[in-house]
Amino acid sequence: MTREDVYRQAIALIESSHSILVTTHTRPDGDACGCVAAISEVLRSLGKKVQPLLLSPLPQWYAFVFTERVPVLGKDIRPEDVTRGTFADVDLVMIADTGSYSQLTGLENYLRQSGKPALVIDHHITSDKLGQVEITDETAGAAGLVFYDFLKYARWPITQMAAQALFVAIATDTGWFQLSNTDSRVYCSCAELVDLGVKPTELYRKLYQDFSHARFKLMVRMLNTLELHLDGRYASQHILLKDFAETGAAFEDTENLIN
């Protein structure tokens, strides 16, 4: 099956759906958050009822990519409530940045038993083939890149908010264009998103220069444990549970600290 065949199947699935649940993997990173935000924005512009759902708390520095607060499974929504209430009329589940049940904690039984069709958009090699349709590209530096290519094929409108979310997805998963997965495709796509109104310097400030005091103190704690071994060829550092309590930081504050 060609890429265009998969695109056409995905478009048909979306166009035939009225209420769409959008989610991603646990411990959502920038790619995951950006994809969920962009997907939700685009689907709403198509007149769809969109219900984004996160499986872990949202890191506060990614909150700006969403136009509304997204409920968290297990905190705002009980697992059993997904099958009734506002989620009862869902006729399509869209999953971004993963195709594995193990990364969909709390929702895996629903996906297996509900009979709802699923559309997966991902760039990882691992997959449980849980989607009725799966748009995957292992050569893409981010799931946001896969979704952007799909949007261009579908010729659906990309608002400035959706473009911003996609830029965040791509830029964060490439280490702000520093990792080896940064290729010409990444640069070209991000340039197109800039032309759609994205302001990279503003996004960089929000993502990397606006740490909370608690997160900054946690980073200092970690750096203070740095030790070099084997004539400087190996480095180790660590964070203890007490460091979170003493600094007031949350577990999600560890994202990107290892970098």
Image: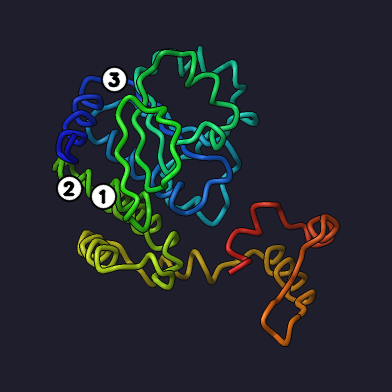
Q: Which residue is mark 1?
A: 148
Q: Give the quadrant of the N terminus.
A: top left
Callout 1 crowding tier (Cα within 10 Å): few <14, some 14–19, many ≥20: many
**Horizontal relation, residue 9 to residue 112: left or right:** left
Q: Amino acid at mark 1?
A: Tyr
Q: Residue at x 63, y 66 (%)?
A: 257
Q: Which residue is mark 3?
A: 18
In the rendered image of this protein, does residue 200 appear above or below residue 13?
below
Residue 258 bears which disc, if any?
none
Q: Amino acid at mark 3?
A: His
Q: Residue at x 58, y 45 (%)?
A: 27
Foreground: 227 or 196?
Answer: 227
Q: Residue at x 30, y 29 (%)?
A: 133
Q: CB atoms at circles 1 and 2 under 8 Å apart?
A: yes
Query: How many angstroms separate mark 1 from mark 2 (CA)?
Result: 6 Å
How far from the left and from the top, in percent, is residue 93?
A: 39, 26
Please tell me whether mark 2 sits on a helix, a strand or a loop: helix
Q: Which residue is mark 2?
A: 152
How far from the left and from the top, in percent, is residue 165?
A: 37, 52
Foreground: 6 or 176?
Answer: 6
Foreground: 214 or 168?
Answer: 168
Callout 3 crowding tier (Cα within 10 Å): few <14, some 14–19, many ≥20: some
Q: Nearer the viewer, mark 3 or mark 2?
A: 2
Q: How many marks can you see? A: 3
Callout 2 crowding tier (Cα within 10 Å): few <14, some 14–19, many ≥20: few
Foreground: 212 or 145?
Answer: 145
